[in-house]
Image (tube, rainbow, N blue to C red):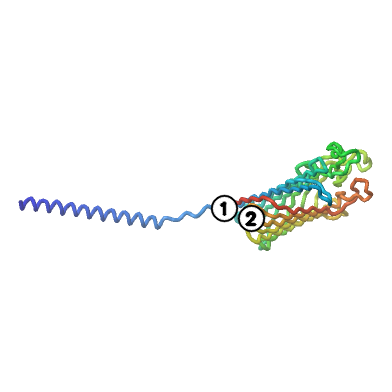
Amino acid sequence: MKKVFTFASVVLAGAMTAFAQDAQTAAAEAAAALSQAEEAPVSAPKPKYWESGVQTNINLGQTWLSQWAAGGSNSVSLAGNIDAKANYAKDKMIWNNRLQMDYGFMYSEDKPILQKTKDRIYLESKWGYETPIRHLSYSANFDFKTQFGDNFEYKTPTTGTTKADWEAARILKSDLFAPAYINLGLGLLWTPKSWFSLNVAPITGGLVVVNRPELQKTYGMDLINADDPTLGYKSTRLELGAQVKADASWVINDNFSYTTQVALFYNYLKPTVEPRIAWDNKVFWKLAKFFALTVSTNLIYDPLVLVRDTDKDGVADAKGVQFKEFLEFGFTYSISAKH
């Protein structure tokens, strides 16, 4: 009995010793693994160079009258716009892109025809590379402006009030690529503040396109042959000049913002002609999650474009200031991302 007890004691002691050695080995391995894990470098987040976003607005208007003494007409209107951006920034280089598209129309009971109220395409792309001077960059600026389709001025017909009569009396004012303005400028970009930039491009090449013959005189296109006006006008005009463009944007909070841009272009090839000026403004006020108030204005002064009818014969024959304003309330939705 004593020998059996002694043998069991030896076996138990050996088992305990082996277990202790295994536990010690496991603890050492765990400590080594923990040490290696602590020393392993933490991978840095992947840099994001692109910032993009899209803001959309859809606005609906309607007027209904019943035995209204002051008069008027029932009408309905629909308009929408898209404001998209895609900006890139890495080291000393930036590349900012913005696309604005506006389109709208209305139907009024007194005019049995759809009337265009908004029609605009504006694409702008800016590239910049920092110089040794603070806030100053070499720059290249591209912009393109036109409209989606034909736009008319609606004159009251003298022959009747049918749809065909209204269509016969209307006057074409613009169309796709009639006109279209394409510019590429090289110069310097000054950005003293995050909300303000000034681009000066003393070398700016431009192309004006008017592919509708009936609009070429209105938009100041050159004669095919100055000695023979009966040959008509050219459909394109090359320009070489200087462009100055100032941009400012104030974002008060996520619900209120104001953006403005002023652009001036002076044509070296027509030194006696005044500069072309364009001034755009936009106020955006988000009143609820999906509803917003938008105020936008567009001012243009182009000394080559005829906009005034001085002799009241229905044909524009003099230059002037063009101005457009919209006050809209409706549905809005925005998305943004960094990647």
Residue at 69% of width from left, 52% of height from top?
126
Q: Residue 277 in the image: state x and y as whole percent.
A: 80, 55
> In this rendering, is residue 112 above or below 133?
above
Q: Secondary structure at mark 1?
A: loop
The numbered dot on residue 40 is none
Q: Residue 76 in the image: state x and y as whole percent.
A: 75, 45
> In this rendering, is residue 263 above or below 170?
below
Q: Is residue 147 left or right of residue 270?
A: left
Q: Is residue 42 left or right of residue 187?
A: left
Any part of residue 74 in sight? yes
Q: Secondary structure at mark 2?
A: strand
Q: Residue 118 in the image: state x and y as whole percent.
A: 76, 47
* Residue type of the residue flagged with mark 1: Lys
The numbered dot on residue 48 is 1
Residue closest to the eye, 7 or 240: 7
Q: How many marks?
A: 2
Residues at marks 2 and 1, CA–CA distance in whole angstroms: 31 Å
Quarter of the view holding residue 211:
top right
Q: Circle 2 sits on which residue? A: 288
Q: Nearer the viewer, mark 2 or mark 1?
A: 2
Q: Residue 286 in the image: state x and y as whole percent.
A: 66, 56
Classify 10 Å Cα crowding around label 2: few (below 14), some (14-19), many (20 and above).
Answer: few
